[in-house]
Each structure stands twice: as structure tokens, then as C-alpha cells.
Amino acid sequence: METISKQLMQRATEEGKLPLPYLQLAEQIKDEDGNKKGVKGTGPHKVELVLDKIVKGQDYQTKEERDEVEFTFIEDDQKKRYSVPVHNKKGGLHYFVQRMSEIEVGEEIILEYQKKEGSFEGYIDIKKVGKEVNKEADKEEIPVVDEESYGL
């Protein structure tokens, strides 16, 4: 039997009165003393694209407001959100936004954090269910994903 508070949370979420949970594609690694040691992927996530929209976010380094694209996905019958900046550090369109432009609403994809070999850098790999969308993002487009990116 579910508790009243769990039922109220579920109803508030369904009615859009609470923000959607984040889709966590990577998690922070800490040593036994709690010091940050990098990030690791949480494995492949099979999701369905529901919508994308422009939202206001905050640059984690400068704390300045910026435009972001917030994607809403369904994973295991639960809606989740994932945000990226509209522009990369060089001012171009963020690689994730470029790759997602190839995906239609309602289409299933697999998202997975990939570490760039021999580096601390990583990126999110996007594959259509049944075929690959991007073989590997261009090296210049791969952002550094660290513990403060995406709230890790």
C-alpha cells in the first residue's frame, strides 16, 4: 500500500506542479575521504523523445544565466529531463543539440556517457534504436564533463 505522501507526490508530478527528475547519464566518483575523482557513466539509457524547449539555465563555472535546450524523455514509463547549453564554449551550436536535431518526437534512442580514451573528457553518445546516429563527436566538439557539469 502506498503512503498518502507518495500518492500526493505522484499526483503533483502528473499535474506538472513539480519539476521532472533529471536523467542522470553520469555520476560523480569520490574517494573514501569524499574527494572528487571524476565521473563515470551510468550505462546505456533507452529513452523516447517527448519534446525539447528553450529554457534559462546557469553556467556552472561563471554562474551567468544562459539559454539551454531542455529535452524531455520517457525512460521506464517516467518522464525525465536533460538540459544542455545552446552554444558550446566556442559559440557554435552544442554537439548534443546538433545530434538531437536528427531525432523525431516519439523516436526511441539510447543515450550513454562515453569517456574519451586517454582523457578526462567525455561526451553523450546518441544511438537510434537499431542504428547509430553519431559515430563519435568531432574531437573539438566534445565538451569536458566534470563533477559540476549537470549538477554532479
Image (tube, rainbow, N blue to C red):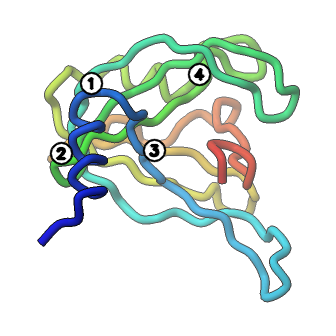
Q: Nearer the viewer, residue 123 or 21?
A: 21
The spot of residue 13 in percent (x, y) is 29, 38
Tell me the SS state at disc 4.
loop
Q: Residue at x 64, y 30 (%)?
A: 141
Q: Residue at x 38, y 37 (%)?
A: 20
Crowding at label 3, few (<14), some or many (≥20) Cα neighbours within 10 Å? some
- Residue that mark 4 sits on: 94
Label 2, label 3: how far apart the Cα atoms are: 21 Å
Q: Are marks 2 and 4 in contact (CB under 8 Å)?
A: no
- The residue type indicated by label 4 comes to His
* Mark sitting on residue 103: 1
In this rendering, would 30 be left or right of 83? right
Q: CA distance from mark 3 to mark 4?
A: 19 Å
Foreground mark, 2 or 3?
3
Q: CA distance from mark 2 to mark 4?
A: 22 Å
Position above or below: 61 against 103:
below
The amino acid on which the numbered mark 3 sits, given as a three-letter code, is Tyr
Return the disc, 1 or 2, that comes first in the chain's sequence. 1
Compare marks 3 and 4 and give the one earlier in the sequence. 3
The mark that comes first in sequence, 2 or 4, is 4
Kindly give the residue lying farthest to the bottom in the view shown: 32
Q: Position of residue 38 (x, y in %)?
A: 74, 65
Quarter of the image that includes the N terminus: bottom left
The tag on residue 129 is: 2
- Distance from disc 1 to disc 3, alpha carbons, whole Å, reads 20 Å
Measured from the top left, where is residue 97 in percent x and y?
Answer: 47, 21
